[in-house]
Amino acid sequence: MEIRPIRPEDVPEVESLLSAADSERVLSEAKARRLGSAGGWVAQSVGGRITAVAQTASHITPSEDVVTGVEIVTPPSADQLFLAMCERVTEEIEGHVEVWAIDPDQSAVLRRQGWIPGRVLLRLDIDLPLEGPVDLPDLYRLVAYRPQDERAFVNANNRAFARHADNSHLTMEEFEARQKLPWFDTGDVLIAKVGDDIAGFCWTKKHDDAGEIYIIGVTPDHRGKGLGQSLLRAGLAHLVERYGFSRGFLYSDADNDAALHVYEALGFAEASRRWVYIRPGDET
């Protein structure tokens, strides 16, 4: 078996491998967008078949540290392949490294190798539709995103997620790139405004069999007023009314107690989880 950087000609086979995999054994959207670019790796069997894929991406934390995240997709119960990919890919990376484990087997492998447990990301599902009306608190009005809202939306996002691992430091270029993705639709982004100011938003995403609350955020000066829960209900109602979905889902950090309380009160329940492990020595 050879573990090597991905080549442009590998991309169709890698995409086929990922599309045939279990729904939970896929790259995150951010990593999937980088397929074929720098930071991608594949494991290729002696017969030439690609059996595993890894993708890296770096981001800047709120404390201005550069962190490289690694996701590895292997067949189920392929612990040795996962470990081999992990060791080969991370040895090329300088600085702080975090590897995502997408199932308990991968989590156990990293623990045995001395990797330090870090963040835990939950997928929470909910049956739709919800009962009851969708009402925003007084002073707020709900509108659909418009292209002229672009800069104000980016600013609101960065205020809402100033200390968040995934959504902080959104740039205009990154937001413009997301708007060019095949699934993006301006009608799926709901905005709560006070006058002309964006107080919060709920960005939804259509999947084949369910609707996702992709990103939901409230700016700091509008928190504690019930706006987040109202936006969440509005987003779920939108997924029912526009697409007819009977199931919705979202992702949340396991230590975000305030958000989890809101989600669970509405009826969300854990469907799966992923773990982040920090390379030994990088945790300080």
Image (cartoon, rainbow, N blue to C red):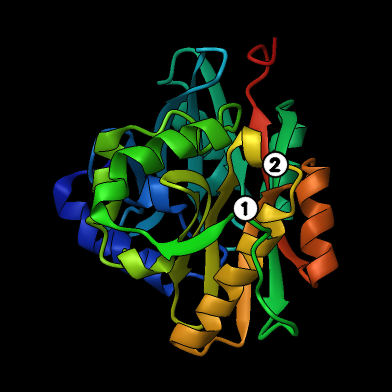
Dot 2: within a 10 Å radius of its alpha carbon, few (fewer than 14), some, or many (20 or more) residues?
A: some
In the rendered image, residue 130, in percent from the top left (x then y), is placed at: 71, 82
Task: Tell me if residue 29 comes above or below residue 270 in the rendering.
Answer: above
For badge 2, the amino acid type reads Arg
Task: Tell me if residue 92 comes above or below residue 64 in the rendering.
Answer: below
- In this rendering, the label closer to the viewer, 1 or 2: 2
Q: Is residue 55 left or right of residue 87?
A: left
Q: Is residue 187 left or right of residue 243?
A: left
SS for dot 1: loop
Dot 1: within a 10 Å radius of its alpha carbon, few (fewer than 14), some, or many (20 or more) residues?
A: many
In the rendered image, residue 254, in percent from the top left (x then y), is placed at: 77, 46
| Residue position marked by numbered label 1 in the rendering | 102
Residue under the image location 59 percent in, 55 percent down: 78
Residue under the image location 65 percent in, 26 percent down: 278
Residue 149 visible within the image: yes
For badge 1, the amino acid type reads Ile
SS for dot 2: loop
Q: CA distance from mark 1 to mark 2?
A: 32 Å
